[in-house]
Image (spheres, rainbow, N blue to C red):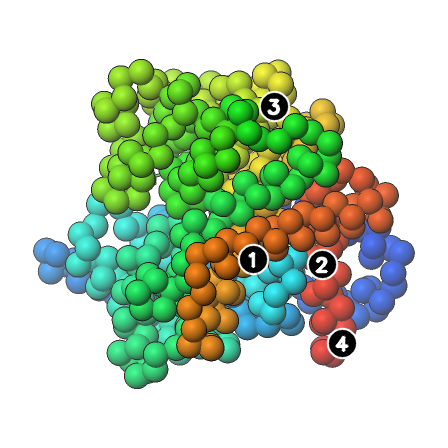
Amino acid sequence: NHNCAENNVFYQAMEEVIYSIAPLLQSDEKYRKHGIMERLVVPDRVIKFKVTWLDDNNIIQVNTGYRIQFNNALGPYKGGLRFHPTVNEGVLKFLGFEQILKNSLTGLHIGGAKGGSDFDPKGKSDFEVMKFCSAYMTELHKYIGARIDVPAGDIGVGSREIGYLFGEYKKITSTYEGVLTGKPFFFGGSLMRPEATGYGAVYFTESMLEMEGKEPLMGKVCTVSGAGNVAVHAIEKLTQIGAVPVACSDSKGTIYDSRGIDVELLKDIKLNKRQSLTKYAEVHAEAKYIPIEEYPEGGHAVWDIPCYAAFPCATQNELTEIDAQNLINNGCVSVTEGANMPSTPEAISLLQSHKVCFAPAKAANAGGVVVSEFEMSQNAAMSKWGFAKVDERLKETMQMICKRVALTAKDYGVEGNYVDGANIAGFKKVADAMIAEGI
Ligand code: NDP
């Protein structure tokens, strides 16, 4: 249904991929002959269901749950669950479609999927979150399995939610298997899964800067949007390598702390206590809090702060053309997408036309799904890897993805264009598997 506004983000994601791979479709007729594009853009299965639960006042609440199993040519369906009021079928189709190519780029055996609900965990008690997760899993368990479909976290779904979902799955099926990733370490999670996406985005950026002949991040001012799982761990890794991340944001405002963000405080406020970023400015009077009412028109305060490298890590379409222009005016050298599709198409073209190194989400934020696959391997083998092993393999994989994307771009005559490189490399592998597996 092309008139349906909720599909706009899905069309946006699809259009970018189609533009990138058009030369490949033209030059290699096998992809056309096998109808790959026509097949790839339609999910294998869209599962939509009602989730009913009782809130703390014993009032019945009704939400909509989804799981979109998009493509399993390369392995079991894999992709996160998002709990946020903005979740609808279009948003999940965009995320699921991106996930197919992202998972393909990792070189691991995982297919693409995404799911979630319009349930808002914000302001709910632990008990309400638990009751919602149980009700959601009562239906979802029919469709998932360690070799079928392995969901993980995303916006609004962290280790607390994964724990409740896992508990319910176990209760219904009596099986203790790696059916979800992002579990807490002490009952089957992998070390470094919470850190993986943020750390991975920084590893990718270092690799990209080196390949593009730019100065490394050490000593450089960086800006990050978001204050969730991805943003906080990107900030943590930047701090560890000697960069100076000076900004972060949540849905209500932005913090600018020119001395570098206090990561421990940020973790406590946002990840542990789930409070507002205003608390940060209450503790550090030197830091400036900018509420959304004071953002530049059509833009975001974070991207107005001068930086060497920018890391959008909150949500889709949060970095506009106006923001891109501000980054360029302030001499920004690289933009790395930690969130999924945070930059608008206009912003990406502008950044690329000004030779800003641009790392697209499906390559740069693959670290989370990479360590999720490590978690699946550990669960299947009933083993546990140490921190150093996970970190080393994550770093190696991010470097491998970066190299592969850069070399693919070069091979197809678009050197330096990581968007095209990622789309072409990701597409080819899935497409070749689809051809080999028949229709
Ligand atoms: P979290 O829920 O942990 O954090 C999301 C952050 O973004 C919060 O600070 C939230 O603010 C802010 N935010 C969310 N929606 C909006 C909005 N509409 N406007 C402004 N700010 C918003 O999510 P994650 O960190 O896990 O995910 C962030 C992004 O990274 C998403 O695009 C996700 O798909 C992507 N991603 C996540 C992976 C993971 O491993 N977790 C893996 C790969 C990609 P507030 O605190 O006020 O709600």
Observer-nearest residue: 197 or 316? Answer: 197
Q: Secondary structure at mark 2?
A: helix
Please give the name of the residue rendered at 43% of the width and 49% of the height, measured from the top-left corner. Answer: 195
Q: Is residue 424 above or below residue 73?
A: above
Q: CA distance from mark 3 to mark 4?
A: 44 Å
The label number, if any, that marks residue 436 in the structure image: 4
Q: Amino acid at mark 4?
A: Ala
For marks 2 and 1, the one nearer the N-term is 1
**130, 246: nearer the viewer:** 246
Q: Which quarter of the frame holds ligand 1? A: top left
Q: Position of residue 337 (x, y in %)?
A: 56, 40
Establish if 333 lies above or below 178.
above
Give the Cα separation between the discs numbered 2 and 4: 14 Å
Task: Estimate the spatial distance between the alpha carbons at disc 4 and disc 1, rounded to whole Å.
Answer: 29 Å
The mark found on residue 427 in the picture is: 2
x, y percent for residue 353? 74, 27
* Apparent side of residue 325 relative to residue 269 in the rendered image (left or right): right
Q: Which mark is residue 332?
A: 3
* Residue marked by disc 1: 393
Eye-nearest disc, 2 or 1: 1
Q: Residue at x 59, y 16 (%)?
A: 330
**Mark 1 burial class by Cα count in 10 Å: few <14, some 14-19, many 20+:** some
| Mark 2 and mark 3: Cα distance apart in space | 30 Å
Q: Amino acid at mark 3?
A: Cys
Q: Secondary structure at mark 1?
A: helix
Q: Residue at x 60, y 39 (%)?
A: 205
Total labels drawn: 4
Query: In the rendered view of the protein, which quadrant contains the N terminus?
Result: bottom right
Q: Secondary structure at mark 3?
A: loop
Residue depicted at x 71% and y 72%:
434
Residue 41 place in picture, x, y as percent: 65, 61
